[in-house]
Amino acid sequence: MSVWNYLKYTPRMFYKRGAMPLYFVFFVTENCNAHCSHCLLGQRTEWVKDELTVDEIEKISASMGDMLFFTPTGGEPFIRKDLAEIVHIFKVNNHAANVGIPTNGSLTGRIVETTETMLRQNPNIDLHIDVSIDGIGEDHDRIRNTPGLFDKAVHTYKELRRLEKHYPNFSVCVQITVSALNQDRLLPLYDYLGKELGVNTVFTLLTRGEPADPMTKDFDIARYEELHRALERDNKARILSGYYKMPFSDVLNAKRIVRPRIIAKTVRENRYQIPCYAGTLGGAMFSRGQVLPCEVRPDRMIANVRDYDYDFGKVWFSRRADEMRRDIRETKCFCTYECFLTVNILFNPLVLPQVFKEYLALKAAKVRHRISPLESGRLHDGVATPAHEE
Ligand code: SF4
């Protein structure tokens, strides 16, 4: 992917109103084959029907502008057999530059096949698949109330790592959802991911919204900070590579050092830290066409795009949308939602110096590593090697 496809969005640091979202989260399905206690979609007892079809999605996408980040999510996004088609639509119509797809990793064959199709059809997107692993073995299965899920997720991760070697624009990451259910075992889990699976990119999601089991949000932020100190240390020691295939990878890696600090401060102080650009730079849509500034606050639903003849612009620039934007601004809305914090950090000139400082630290670490490669733990040319393959 050319750097221009990223740089063309820099003016949006200075003007944010009157344009379409450049970070778009689309719940391609709300259905899932796991039953995670921390799921932000809450308790789902019935299969959601009447989700947007590919034809409907095509019309919606055609009415939207270009986007830097496109996140097809769920539910389990790979449940949709037409996921590759959906990604292609957003690539063609909206020039989606960076596509990130979370998965519970349960459908190994379909995930690998669909990923390969997406990579073949869209050779110039930066694609990353984020496989969820929240605990080791049965611990993970218990958190996600799904027997056998850990083994499947690990299998999927390994298969995607194989695929990664053949595509310069593809990366696979592990995402850990931090909740009251695993907070006491985060460091052993991280240790396991590095030593046993050779995981080279890890990031976290802090349980948010109205989870299926409300007590999952009863976490101790100190445990989260402890894990992030380890991640920062290993990123700077080049034991973790973080992103390394995308343009501006180290800017994104630096952002991943700054972001958890903002999240931890938000939780500790329980107050606003930086402006949120949901409703301007960021937007979300549920699987039946409900458009929102962000999915964390479903009460701020703007409208259903089906009622607007699939014209996203009409919804996005409606009076109700303006009211929601004003509400977010005037109430100084705050939360810990990682995806939108990405744009809240990268498009805020006042926060960027913090990112730049960490960027320089990562670059300095790379230079040190080149001078003395033995400093590095598991990395070989940016790719970690599973311990058992060393
Ligand atoms: S701060 Fe969080 S809840 Fe509020 S608008 Fe932004 S993303 Fe949504």
Image (spheres, rainbow, N blue to C red):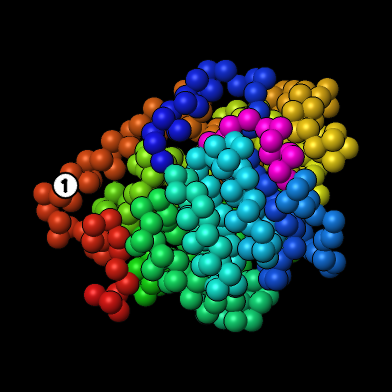
Q: Is mark 1 within 8 Å of ligand 1?
A: no
The relative height of residue 258 versus residue 380 in the rendered view (above or below) is above
Q: Does residue 140 appear to the left or right of 353 in the view shown? A: right
Q: Name the image quarter holding residue 344.
A: top right
Query: x, y (%) of residue 266?
Result: 58, 40
The residue labelled by disc 1 is 368
Q: Secondary structure at mark 1?
A: helix
| The furthest residue to the left | 371
Horizontally, residue 127 falls left or right of residue 285, namely left
Q: Is residue 133 above or below residue 357?
A: below
Q: Is residue 67 magenta?
A: yes
Give the x, y percent position of residue 24. 63, 40
> Does 272 sit left or right of 325 as displayed?
left
- Image-quadrant location for residue 83: bottom right
Q: Amino acid at mark 1?
A: Arg
Measuring 30% from the left and 79% from the top, which residue is drawn there?
388
Span shown in magenta: 57-68
**Quadrant where the N terminus lies?**
top left
Q: Does 253 sit left or right of 153 as displayed? A: left
